[in-house]
Image: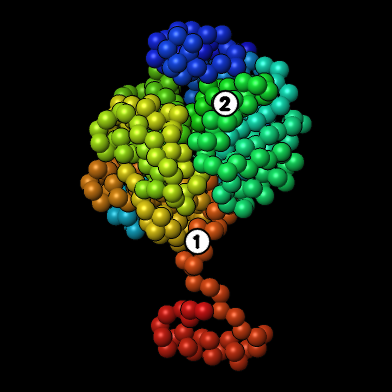
């Protein structure tokens, strides 16, 4: 049973049928899924949601498919943890981490968007799945396509992390590595989508795909006891996740599932080497000036973000803000998160924590209000970023005397021995 009313242009509100369309033919605005909220209100409540399996499909009525999902039964409902050690380190009183570094099956939040896109693609009769990716989407499309027996074609920029390439190839996906930036990959893929009729999850299926990100927001509210946090910090690439978290909060409010005002402020985080959306926020304009990415945060390296304008809008509406951090600050924050909370996040996590730190220091985020940091990907996939930044292991022979002298030299210097 579907609760979709159709697709609707975000600019001129023209309505379209629930097909593989993503751009308005009148004004070129992006299309978004529209729901029958009155109908949803009659069937969806806190109790109904809580009675369901702990995965992203517990919010089924608010996701754009007609029947049952064909993938993603293990995706979502990741931990929201109280980060007491990091609270001390940052000097704040109520801090949480929403941890999609352990989202299944491919250890990033992209499994949420892909399970919706592929489930919808199958309903629409596509026989091939494809995507343009900065890495995590590639992993997720390859894995989830394999899981439902569909062939996949994945297009990536040539300079991705090796683990993200291996973690795509292993599922049998056809991978095309393109000499160019993500934005060039994306442009080529738009042409391929038109010519070959494949289901590109983030191009012709984008309106459906993007809705999957809402579950990240629903879960934050549910896991806080059906409350909104005061502040949420979100990493931005194309800018879809941040706009959908904002949409999710407003939907829960509209449905009466979370009462009161939506007082949450949403903050966008980017790397200084690719910050087209944050630059617009800082300049107080909603004009996005595309950039050429140069950062270790490759998963966020989109120079011409599709949802840039709407990200700025969500940030403004929610009274949030934006900030950016250098590559050195990204590494420092990856280490801080690991050392304080035992969470190994990828570079995007370093961006989000680094920006959070900055916003707290600037006084933009008050120290005594609830804060949620969005961790969206796993550090094992971006190990290159830490090369030369960690203390190497000490090498000794398997002799107690050698270990003894190691302990002695450590206690003398008062510091761990550096290799
Ligand atoms: C894709 C991605 C994002 C941002 O996604 P958008 O919705 O395009 O803004 C954030 N973090 C990680 C790890 C990602 O892979
Ligand atoms: Zn339009």
- Toward the viewer: 72 or 125? 125
The residues bearing labels 2 and 1 have C-alpha atoms spaced at a distance of: 34 Å
**Which mark is drawn over residue 239?**
none
Q: Residue at x 39, y 35 (%)?
A: 290
Q: Is residue 375 left or right of residue 72?
A: left
Q: Is residue 106 left or right of residue 207?
A: right
Residue 160, percent from left and from top: 57, 48
Q: Is residue 134 above or below residue 93?
A: above
Q: Residue at x 43, y 34 (%)?
A: 304
Residue 33, percent from left and from top: 51, 17
Residue denoted by label 1: 386
Residue count near mark 2 (Cα–Cα under 10 Å), binned few <14, some 14–19, many ≥20: some
Is residue 168 among the parts visible in the rendering?
A: yes
Q: Name the quadrant of the N terminus.
A: top right
The secondary element bearing badge 2 is classed as helix
Name the outermost residue toward the front. Answer: 179
Residue count near mark 1 (Cα–Cα under 10 Å), binned few <14, some 14–19, many ≥20: some
Q: Is residue 360 above or below residue 383?
A: above
Q: How is the image coloured?
A: rainbow
> Are dots 2 and 1 in contact, CB under 8 Å?
no
Q: Residue at x 44, y 33 (%)?
A: 305
Name the outermost residue toward the right. Answer: 149
- Toward the viewer: 34 or 62? 34
Q: Is residue 158 above or below residue 25?
A: below
Earlier sequence position, callout 2 versus callout 1:
2
The secondary element bearing badge 1 is classed as helix
Residue 102, percent from left and from top: 57, 46
> In the figure, residue 249 lies in which quadrant?
top left
**Which mark is drawn over residue 190?**
2
Q: Is residue 55 left or right of residue 172?
A: left
Disc nearest the viewer among 2 and 1 = 2
């Amino acid at each position: 049973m579907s609760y979709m009313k159709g697709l609707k242009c975000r600019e001129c509100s023209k309505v379209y049928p629930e097909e593989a369309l993503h751009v308005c033919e009148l004004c070129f605005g992006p299309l978004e899924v529209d729901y029958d909220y009155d109908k949803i209100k009659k069937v969806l409540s806190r109790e109904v949601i809580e009675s369901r399996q702990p995965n992203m499909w517990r919010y089924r009525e608010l996701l754009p498919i007609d029947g049952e999902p064909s993938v993603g039964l293990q995706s979502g409902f990741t931990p929201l943890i109280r980060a007491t050690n990091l609270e001390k380190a940052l000097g704040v009183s109520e801090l949480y981490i929403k941890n999609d570094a352990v989202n299944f099956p491919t250890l990033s939040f992209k499994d949420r968007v892909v399970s919706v896109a592929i489930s919808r693609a199958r309903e629409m009769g596509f026989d091939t799945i494809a995507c343009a990716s900065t890495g995590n989407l590639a992993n997720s499309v390859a894995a989830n396509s394999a899981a439902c027996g569909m062939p996949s074609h994945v297009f990536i920029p040539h300079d991705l992390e090796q683990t993200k390439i291996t973690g795509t190839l292993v599922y049998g996906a056809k991978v095309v590595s393109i000499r160019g930036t993500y934005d060039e990959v994306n442009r080529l893929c738009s042409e391929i989508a038109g010519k070959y009729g494949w289901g590109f999850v983030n191009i012709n299926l984008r309106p459906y795909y993007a809705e999957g990100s809402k579950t990240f927001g629903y879960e934050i509210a549910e896991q806080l006891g059906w409350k909104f946090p005061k502040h949420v910090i979100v990493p931005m690439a194309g800018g879809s996740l941040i706009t959908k978290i904002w949409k999710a909060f407003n939907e829960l409010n509209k449905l009466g599932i979370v009462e009161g005002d939506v007082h949450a402020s949403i903050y966008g985080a980017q790397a200084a080497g690719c910050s087209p959306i944050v630059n617009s926020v800082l300049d107080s304009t909603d004009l996005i000036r595309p950039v050429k990415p140069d950062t270790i945060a490759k998963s966020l390296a989109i120079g011409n973000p599709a949802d840039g304008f709407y990200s700025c809008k969500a940030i403004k509406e929610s009274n949030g803000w934006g900030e950016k951090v250098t590559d050195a600050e990204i590494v420092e924050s990856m280490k801080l998160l690991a050392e304080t909370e035992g969470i190994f996040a990828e570079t995007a996590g370093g961006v989000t924590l680094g920006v959070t730190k900055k916003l707290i220091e600037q006084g933009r985020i008050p120290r005594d209000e609830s804060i949620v940091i969005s961790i969206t990907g796993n550090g094992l996939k971006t190990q290159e970023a830490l090369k030369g930044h960690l203390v190497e292991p000490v090498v000794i022979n398997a002799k107690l005397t050698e270990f003894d002298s190691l302990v002695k030299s450590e206690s003398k210097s008062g510091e761990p021995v550096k290799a």
